[in-house]
Amino acid sequence: MRSSNPVFSRRGFSRDTGYAGFNTPPQAGGVGADPYAGANPYAQTATQAPQYTPQTRPMTMDDVVMRTAFTLGTVIVGAVVGWLYLTEQLGFAIGAGIAAMVLGFVQSFKRKPSPPLILAYAALEGVFLGALSGNLNSLPNMNGAPMQAVLGTMAVFVTMLIAYKTRIVRVTARFTRFLMIATMGFVLLSLVNVLFMVFGGGDGLGFRSGGLGIVFGLVGVVLGALFLALDFKQVEDGIAYGAPREESWLAAFGLTLTLVWIYMEMLRLISILRD
């Protein structure tokens, strides 16, 4: 399975067709083997005993949780700086956002995760989000909107985690195909809307206000929530495969990307509802 999150579409976090369970690591063959599973990229041969050091031991869920918390904490620190000092200087904030996007692309295509690069992305992304949120919070009728977006993002995360762990939401090949198609359509409509706004002025196709804007915002939040389920599955597969401990930084980066997306969509939806 290939995750639509480019961060997870790397060796160790994906397979072409199979799905691994958290408590049932995939087998390379034989009785009970998953007929759809690909080869374990971290498998040892029959004559090789795993030789783990503190740096190369398999990652655990605790590793993913700790590094995700650290990465999100860096985003929060950056957001505080942006809120306090750059609310009235959106030019600098936009520059930080562009820099964060560049660093995100660089990390996405690197062969191995780079903790300094990931944390630099988190800090810059936080500065951008903090300044943008602070500016929005200062507008008439928008006071408190960023906090509502934060609470909404947390609610989406907890809801999807419960739905995934209880198997209410199951990540299958059909689920992944649907999510990919829906996301491509969403992104395409967003780009078309931006073009109409740039060349036609006004609100473009109307995706930023009114009833259509509310529907579009809800779709964005739902897609982000579904990406969380896909990310959870990829993390489980990485743990089941015995991915190296350093890959937990990659998991933290991917989850941070998804949560930032949900927050942005939530903030847009709340601003439309309040306007």
Image (cartoon, rainbow, N blue to C red):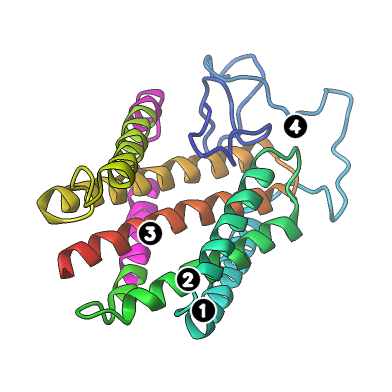
Residue type highlighted by circle 3: Met
Q: For mark 4, what is the residue? A: 42
Q: Using the numbered discs, state the Cα–Cα distance from disc 4 to disc 2 in whole angstroms.
A: 46 Å
Residue type highlighted by circle 4: Tyr
Residue type highlighted by circle 1: Leu
Tell me how many marks there are.
4
Determine contact: label 3, label 2, CB under 8 Å: no
Residue range in magenta is 151-179
Q: Is residue 50 above or below residue 55?
A: above
Counting from the top left corner in percent of width and height, residue 129 is at 47, 67
Q: Using the numbered discs, state the Cα–Cα distance from disc 4 to disc 3 in whole angstroms.
A: 36 Å
Q: For mark 1, what is the residue? A: 86
- The earlier-in-sequence mark between 1 and 4 is 4
Determine contact: label 4, label 3, CB under 8 Å: no
Q: Residue furthest bottom?
A: 84
Badge 3, how many Cα within 10 Å: few under 14, some, many 20+? many
Residue type highlighted by circle 2: Leu
